Amino acid sequence: MVNALRYAADAPAGGNKTYIFSLIPELVRRFSEATWVLLTAGDNRNFFERNAPEADIFSHNLPAKMNRRVPLEHLIVRRTLKFIQPNLYFSPATLLSIGKCRCPSVVTIHDLNFAHFSQGFFKDRYKWWLYRKTCNEADSIIANSRFTADDICEKFPDSSGKVTVIYEGVDHKFFNADFQDDAISNLREKLALPERFILSLAHLRHKNADGMLRIFARALPEIKGKCNLVIIGVLEGERRRLESKADSLGIGTVTHFLGYLSREDYRDLLKGAEAFVFPSLFEGFGLPILEAMACGSPVLSSNRTSLPEVVGDAGIICDPDNTEQFAGLLIQLLNNQALRGQLVAKGFERVSDFSWRKAAAETFAVLTEVI
């Protein structure tokens, strides 16, 4: 049985959602000899019926808000496990349910962000307890990077020996789709963007939007030609604060803050950007890096946590706290067409090593070992 309850089909895109919605259909399609039971929600059932039609689906209606959705998920999983009594339970959404699992279990832990960035005293304590329980009870744990695997084993020593690193994939067909020049032109017009821009994203604090603003402010005077900054995924509650920060740095008129975009608009912005810049302070994997490379966008990234693993030699990495050096590398990247071309070519080569087909094969091997 596979837990696919966590996200609505129309929920904002994020790494965990992309993982669940990409890996599960690939597992079901590739290994149809297994009997797959998907535990879905009413708001994502249609997606899995279309994309994993070989699976048996048990569906439950859940609220959209996570603070209500997740507690109900725990209850539904416990009841369904007791009713179905599967040979194996796979949770691709970080945690096992509260209570005994009653069968062998595999869980994917995407990161231990809460252990590095506090989310509040009570929430932190709850997460420490639930992650410790998950790491102790799971028969096997999948981590999406070597950094996350080491982090898990350090924080929860009982998990040592049962963590397997399986990298995430990229939807090559989608991100490598033929790109029409008028697509970005129409998108720029729709979003009121200039012809030249660099792209970043920052929907959570550790994505480091403040650092991105400081880097861009330092680089702007030396960038040849007009080049604006576009930051996507900005939550409405953060927009005013970031706009005020950009104004104070003197870059308010050349900085654009956008909310969550459709998957197609996100891809087209990546394809139209001069560069993808990602000064994140913490990542369990770093899927946007691969998506940028797949779109032919040169990458300038933080050197923190898992990101060097993902970037390899196909992008430029730098300490995100070193604003001066990061800005200097951004200036070099934007002003050196030959360097940009080299990074684009290396990016295409690098991203070819990551696929959901490969991730599914390695995941299935872990699942079958546990049974």
Image (cartoon, rainbow, N blue to C red):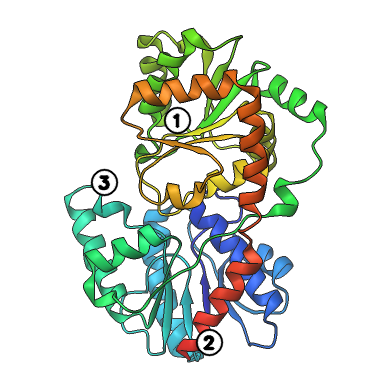
Residue 105 lies, with reference to residue 307, above or below; the image says: below
Q: Residue 352: give x, y in percent of width and height.
A: 66, 55
The numbered dot on residue 257 is: none
Assess disc 1: are there few (<14), some (14-19) or many (≥20) residues with their C-alpha within 10 Å of its C-alpha. few
Q: Earlier in the sequence, mark 1 or mark 2?
A: 1
Select label 1 or label 3 by which is in front. Answer: 3
Quarter location, residue 157: bottom left
Select label 3 or label 2 by which is in front. Answer: 2
Badge 3 marks a residue whose secondary structure is loop
Badge 1 marks a residue whose secondary structure is helix
Label 2: which residue? 368
Q: Do the residues labelled 1 and 3 touch (CB within 8 Å)?
A: no
The amino acid type, in three-letter code, at marker 1 is Glu
Q: Distance between the residues labelled 3 and 2?
A: 35 Å
Q: Which of marks 3 and 2 is nearer the N terminus?
A: 3
Q: Residue at x 55, y 50 (%)?
A: 11
Q: Residue 176: give x, y in percent of width and height.
A: 74, 46
The amino acid type, in three-letter code, at marker 3 is Phe
Q: Residue at x 47, y 82 (%)?
A: 89
Q: Which residue is drawn at 25% across and 49% down?
A: 116
The amino acid type, in three-letter code, at marker 2 is Thr
Q: Residue 6: give x, y in percent of width and height.
A: 48, 62
Label 3: which residue? 117
Q: Are marks 1 and 2 in contact (CB under 8 Å)?
A: no
Residue 29 lies, with reference to residue 124, above or below; the image says: below
Foreground residue among 161 and 21: 161
Q: In this view, does 150 lie to the left or right of 49?
A: left
Quarter location, residue 155: bottom left
Assess disc 2: are there few (<14), some (14-19) or many (≥20) residues with their C-alpha within 10 Å of its C-alpha. few
The numbered dot on residue 236 is: 1
Q: Which of marks 1 and 3 is nearer the N terminus?
A: 3
